Amino acid sequence: MKTPVLRVALAVPLPKFFDYLPPRGPAACRPGQRVLVPFGRGTRIGVVVECLDRSEIPVENLKRVAGVLDPEPLLDAAHLDFLRWSAAYYHHPAGEVVCAALPARLRKEKKPLAFRERLWHLCADPEQACAQTRRAPRQRRVVELLSSSPQRALPREALNALGGDVGGALRALAGKGLIEQTEPRPVSPARLDGVAVPELHEEQRAAVEAVAGALGRFAPFLLEGVTGSGKTEVYLRLARRVLARGDSVMVLVPEISLTPQLQRRFAERFGAQVALLHSALGAGERERAWQRVRLGEARVVLGTRSCVLYPVDRLGLVIVDEEHDTSFKQQEGFRYSARDLAVIRAQRAGCPVLLGSATPSLETLHNARGGRYHWLRLRQRAGGAKAPSIELLDIRDQPLRSGLSQPLLRELERTLARGEQGMVFINRRGYAPVLACYSCGWVSDCPRCDARQTVHRRAGLLWCHHCGSQRRIPRHCPECGSAELNPLGQGTEQLEQRLSEQFPGVPLIRVDRDATARKGSLDRLLARVRAAEAALLVGTQMLAKGHHFPRVTLVGVVDADGGLFSADFRAPERLAQLLVQVAGRAGRGERPGRVLIQTRYPEHPLMQVLVREGYDAFAGMALAERREAAYPPFTHQALLRAEAGDAEAPLALLRDLVEALGETGPVSLWGPVPAPMARRVGRYRAHLLLQSERRAELHRVLDRLGDLLPGLPGVRRVRWSLDVDPVDSY
Ligand code: ADP
Ligand code: ZN
Ligand code: ZN
């Protein structure tokens, strides 16, 4: 007998959907609608994925949907299909993946918010408004931003890009009658022509035309261009072309590069058409932005990783900026790559996808070299800025002070004397990575990890960067009582101290996660740098991304060598990307920049090729090495991680699994082995790596693995996770 049944996705870690009887009464229910269903002892919110006319489960065992929450589907059939495909590819529970397409609030709250966001509208004449805000800089900037945007109106989230107390400024301006709140109106593309835009240079024009020529069908592009070559300008132009067709554009950026500068550029061009989606938004703001994108009220979506899972009305172009950035890979739970899913998404939407970077990932370059991606290049910097020169600084015979060599200090001094800015880069925060006793050999081991606690001198703490464990810096050695405790190595804090001693009176700013923990403090620090003349910046990779420092003309890289000899086969790629990105921070104004890389291995082939011939030559060499060693992108990998409170259980489980899998044909199994950091947060960890030249074969084995693993006797004591296309082997 036929009985209508609803198949529902729930955010639970089980690899299946759940069948329910439709609600009583006439309420029709379609895929993509949210429903409230009984589950376990309570109720949950789920998403209908299919309406069937029978279930494998006997009708008498089926429970009934308790309520339908949305009058219309939130996700359409094609999008549900994309989500199910993604779940299958990453071998992750499909219910969790489907629910990840909703903003967090709609996963918990039954009732959606009224999403119509009101706009702040400049109702006075811009000149008059400027005159009336002469003594209030923030109000003045609000007025400027509003007057430069289409229709002189912006949503609050776009104005937040100004930083600081925007709410106060808005209240004051409204009090003066200069601005008022209005309902949003769709922006007609023609109106956007009023915004001042630079004339495109030849390569930019070619890139825009190539992608614009592919609108309406799937086509993947790589846009390779050094920092400052005008990639963002290309995105902005393309977005305008997409809007003119009545379609939407999705721009994915790494969290850290979603800077106020970038937000402002989009807000200026597209005003209320822009929706921002990033992790700093409150739940309500996020839900509203999500709805505007879904319904096409905002047709320019600027967001981070998770955005790729969200529904977009009439998706016409997908852009992934800084596509090489590893933050596009989610490292826990649903371990997807937003970059890779962006390509699949575009393919299914039948639209082009543009991957942009100054330092493309080897995976993407491999696709471009093989002709699978169209390869667009911007070789020059826009606006005539010169490319920086990169030099190696041999420090083998150099005495170092806090890691800094004399030649580097001398060059910094000259730079400052010219009224320019210098930047010193080290990829480690804190004062020093280890505290050690010279008498007995004690070191600051973390009690819970196979790692050292870092010295944070200003906070007076030893602090593990892996698990967060802390203790006060001891005065005496905990082992032998000696008072001779020494920090080994350097971090940002130490460089900051050293440089402030060396250059007293020079403004010095440290940029790392400790210095910028409070919301908005990074923007304040950066504003200080931009306002200053001679100044020094010290920082971690936070400095290498997204920001423009026009006055920086010298960049010193203190600790490049670690990446040359790492056990991780991706380390050289990461190092090269970092060095080129750091170099991109120098000399963006009129004056050319210089980059000095301190190294003990100036003859290392990687360093040589990178410095003499540039990133592409390096990438060619690195790809040849990968091919030789049968590493990705020439093979495909999946990493099975297992962890437990004792050391033996994870290894035993993985051994049992290998035995149960038996013959795996063209799929090689490496391990099980203890993870590179075998103990972390007090738990023991083991790995099994699966690798094959043939992706389909690998996925067949992963399917079998997913079936076998939950049935193995040791599985209850072990937490495990599968990582398809892993980007690190942690
Ligand atoms: P990227 O994204 O590659 O780092 P941007 O698009 O941010 O480059 O451009 C760098 C700077 O050059 C920006 O200040 C931008 O406004 C400017 N710019 C971009 N294209 C042009 C152009 N064609 N003419 C003049 N200036 C440009
Ligand atoms: Zn000691
Ligand atoms: Zn730890």
Image (tube, rainbow, N blue to C red):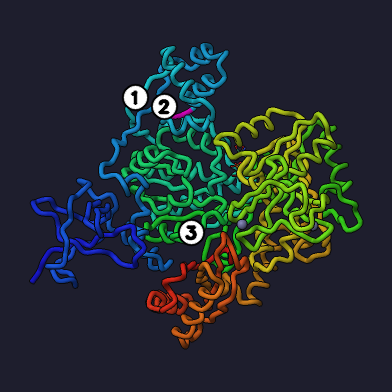
Question: Of label 3 and label 2, which has the lower sequence position?
Answer: 2
* Secondary structure category for the residue under label 2: strand
Q: Indicate the position of residue 621 as horizontal and vertical percent values.
A: 70, 68
User: Disc 1 residue type?
Assistant: Thr
Question: Contact, CB < 8 Å: mark 3 with mark 1?
Answer: no
Q: Which residue is mark 1?
A: 182
Relative depth, front residue between 91 and 721: 721
Nearer to us in this view, 508 or 624:
508
Secondary element at tag 1: strand
Give the magenta-colored segment's residue range: 149-154
Q: Real-space Cα distance between discs 3 and 1?
A: 41 Å
Residue 714: assigned label: none
Secondary structure beneath dot 3 equals loop
Q: How far, Cα to Cα, is label 2 from label 1?
A: 8 Å
Q: Is residue 405 magenta?
A: no
User: Left or right: where does residue 596 sit relative to residue 717?
Assistant: right
- At x 36% / y 43%, what residue is drawn? 290
Residue for badge 3? 332
As rendered, which of 385 and 585 lies closer to the eye? 585
